[in-house]
Image: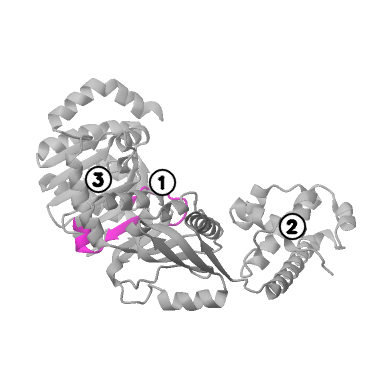
Amino acid sequence: MISEGYATTLKKLITFTQAKFISLANVVGYDVSYVNKWSNGTKLPSSRYVERINEELGQYFADLIIKQRKEDKFSKTFPIEIGTDTLGFAICQYLCAAYRFTLNQNRSAKGKDSCPSIQIITGCHDTADFLADVLQNSIQNLEEDGELIIYGDFCTMYDAGFWEFLEPIHLTTHKLTIRVGLDLDKLETDPAYVGYLYETLDNYLDFDFMFYDASQIAQANIIILKGIFTIQYALTLPSRFIMCTYISDEARVRDIYEKFSYVGSEKKELISTVSALGMDELDFRTSFYATNRFFFFLTNGFEFILPHEVFDNIKKQVSPEKAFSIQRLCVTWEEVLNASEITFIMPTASLLRYAESGYIYLTDVEYNLTPEERKKHIQSIFEGLRKNPRLTTAVMLPSLHGNVFKGQNLAFYSNYTTGFLKKNKKYINNDANSFYVLVNPRLHAIVLHYFQNLKNLPTYHEYTVDQLEKKYEVFKLLIERTVFLNK
């Protein structure tokens, strides 16, 4: 009969076989932090997946034992007597028994606890520390895709330091959708909040944010991580967390989620997130380019005015369906670039990164231009600018204040009627979506106005094609060395 918990049993098996945590993590398909927590007792595998996890661990441990010729020693150390052909199954059953033992212990402990599922935290410092800890631990240890619902305004939560609580989190296995309110009046009155919004989206590329009109949200001051916890919080003026009530009881959390879920409600999205914009008939991207005036803040390389051979090489690397979309995009852009009024702005850091790597994220395809393709691209840009004098090119120099324009991973595209933000897919660590569509016209106008006002900053520099060619001649040797550096 098993008399040891899951963590103790797992740790003994790891010690006996000298298995590495990173190898175990690869075997079960989880981050190494999960396996660490299973072995030190701070967390258990999800009951939904524990049988599969134990099967894979059991077989891996059995293979190590046989490889190390430790079968006899294993039988003396562990209460398992079995042949080598069924050793993996026996270890799996042993782990499952230890798992059940731990669950029974936990139920007994909860029964003795007078209030196991509700905590009340007060004081600004203690409340902020608690919120940071519970958010980081719960989100980092998600065992399936998660949903974080925030009844409150993004700007108010920013002022309270809430988004900083998420700073250390990097999701590699699962996705997290964050639903939160957005006060359009605040954004319009104080454009700095647009910068904070951009900065937050740029910092958390692994998350999918969805924003709703804050005026349509009940003043509930609730944070819900679906299936994990509910927190009701109180703020002081100016915005600081002063108290929160934490609820982890599964039934209560489920009940609160059902009452406050955004899904299926009448609340309209201001910004939605999608995996791709596509290039099919009547889709968003096609309608987006059906005009003659655009504004682009580019951070993921310069995918415009590309040489035709780049499009041809991209088409060779993708499926026939995507190749057709790429060809349509090539034709569309050629028409747009020859006849439209377009403003291009690029942070210098992004421009240099493109020169070094040649990385672009074209429609839904990642591609790295070769050094030769990058050299031809430069000449193609000069030709395009000369052909259409309505193309404006500008750069944003680095700021001493370390503001938003060092971000480099979130581009903004607008046709003055609607717009979208595009993540740099290279820096997304999970399956998070790549695009944010600005669904609300008023919000789009606010964001566009913010980016247009970059022209008023001292770090903004606009160039004619003649000035660009002169700059290129001055720095030609350095640019070509940079381009060929990573050949």
Choose top left, top right, bottom left or bottom right for residue 443. bottom left
Q: Label 2, label 3: how many angstroms apart (C-alpha)?
A: 51 Å
Q: Position of residue 283 (x, y in %)?
A: 25, 63
Amino acid type at image mark 2: Leu
Quadrant into which the N terminus falls: bottom right
Query: Which range of residues does the magenta coloring cover?
Result: 423-445
2 or 1: mark nearer the eye: 2
Q: Is residue 8 visible?
A: yes
User: Which scheme is used to colour this image of the protein?
Assistant: one colour
Q: Position of residue 457 (x, y in %)?
A: 20, 38
Q: Label 2, label 1: how many angstroms apart (C-alpha)?
A: 36 Å
Q: Residues within 10 Å of mark 2 (few under 14, many from 20)?
A: many
Residue hosting label 1: 426
- At x 43%, y 54%, the residue is 206
Looking at the image, residue 178 lies above or below residue 359: below
Based on the picture, tell me whether residue 429 belongs to the magenta stretch. yes
* SS type, badge 3: strand
Q: Earlier in the sequence, mark 2 or mark 3?
A: 2
Amino acid type at image mark 3: Phe
Amino acid type at image mark 1: Lys
Looking at the image, residue 472 lies above or below residue 107: above
- At x 87%, y 63%, the residue is 81
Based on the picture, tell me whether residue 289 belongs to the magenta stretch. no
Residue hosting label 2: 10
Residue hosting label 3: 297
